[in-house]
Amino acid sequence: MTDRVLLGNRGGEYGLWVSRPGFDVKTAGEDGLLMSTSIRTLQVVRSGSFSGTGVVGISWAPVGFRPRLFFGTQHAIQAITYTSDNSASINVYDMQGTVSSQWNVGSVPTLSSTTYWFAINEPA
Amino acid sequence: MVNRVLLDTGLKVSQPGVDVLSANPLQLLFNSDWSGLGVVQSGTWTAPWPGGSTMDVGGFINFTKTFSSIPFCAFFLVRGGYMSPLGYGNGFFTSVRNSDSGTQSRSALLAQVSTTGIQFRAMLYRVSNPGLVNVDYTVRYFVFDRNT
């Protein structure tokens, strides 16, 4: 069975490492590791969703810093303006009009009005 | 030597040189109070060039599981050996104007994500001298999941 968790000395560096299945944690390269105390593990610190377009305000419980935001939407994110370390104003451009005027083969898609967002453990 | 790993009711790991007992949130490399994020599925979807002047092609990619909420996905258009990110996590449009007639050739790729998969649609409307190349549309997609 392959060793996958190491808490201690790895190549002269003390820390915590977890390898991917099938990879020996003592010898795995960076691509064979799930977690390493040498690099920051990408994590989601807050998330949410909202409906509608135009200028929309979002907020989240404080995390101790201003986190980088990511969005998933069927419209267009034109601008992200932080109003504090735990709030932002999002300018969402409604793409349904463009889709309706440009899509001229088959049936015109209907875009969902919901935008999903999440914040990661990296500063904005 | 500073303390870098704290395992009590959870797990925290600090940056090198930073004591995990006094680290601020940005000085942590890992914090079990937060969710992990990783790619759980990836692949490609291709709309083959139809050979004519119009195209309306759809396809559905099933997720390997049903998510409790719509997952975040990233999309890239693969052309000419490079990948171009598709905007806003869901779709993009391009438009080319025909200067003679004033009509427009246009193409579009749309990806609509649900909890069970991704619905792709590719549309093409081509007029004469459109400036559009006859190539397949291939989209590379990545599906992210988080453990809360």
Image (tube, grey):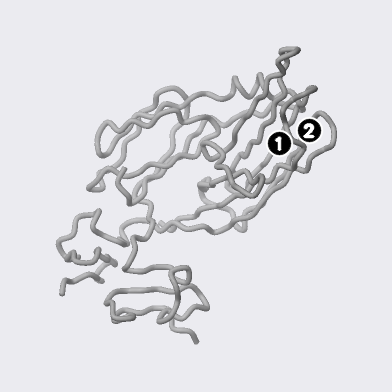
Above or below, comparing residue A68 to residue A102 in the picture: below
Above or below, comparing residue B89 to residue B53 in the picture: below
Q: Which of marks 1 and 2 precedes in the sequence?
A: 2
Mark 1 falls within which chain?
B
Residue A7 or residue B52, whichever sits in front: B52
Residue carrying label 2:
B55
Kindly indicate the quadrant of the structure image that contains residue B37. bottom left
Q: Residue type at mark 2: give it.
A: Met
Q: Residues within 10 Å of mark 1 (few under 14, many from 20)?
A: many
Residue carrying label 1:
B122
Q: Which mark is residue A78?
A: none
Kindly indicate the quadrant of the structure image that contains residue B6. bottom left
- CB atoms of marks 2 and 1 within 8 Å: yes
Q: Residue at x 24, y 64 (%)?
A: B14
Identify the residue at the far top of this view: B101
- Element marked by disc 2: strand
Q: Residue at x 34, y 60 (%)?
A: A40
Q: Quadrant of the C terminus of chain B?
A: bottom left
Residue B13 or residue B85, whichever sits in front: B85
Q: Position of residue A93 (x, y in %)?
A: 49, 24
Above or below, comparing residue A89 to residue B43 in the picture: above
Q: Residue type at mark 1: give it.
A: Ala
Mark 2 falls within which chain?
B
Q: Residue at x 70, y 46 (%)?
A: B60
> Is residue B67 rendered to the left or right of residue B94?
left
Q: Quadrant of the N terminus of chain B?
A: bottom left
Q: Position of residue B115 (x, y in %)?
A: 57, 47
- Element marked by disc 1: strand
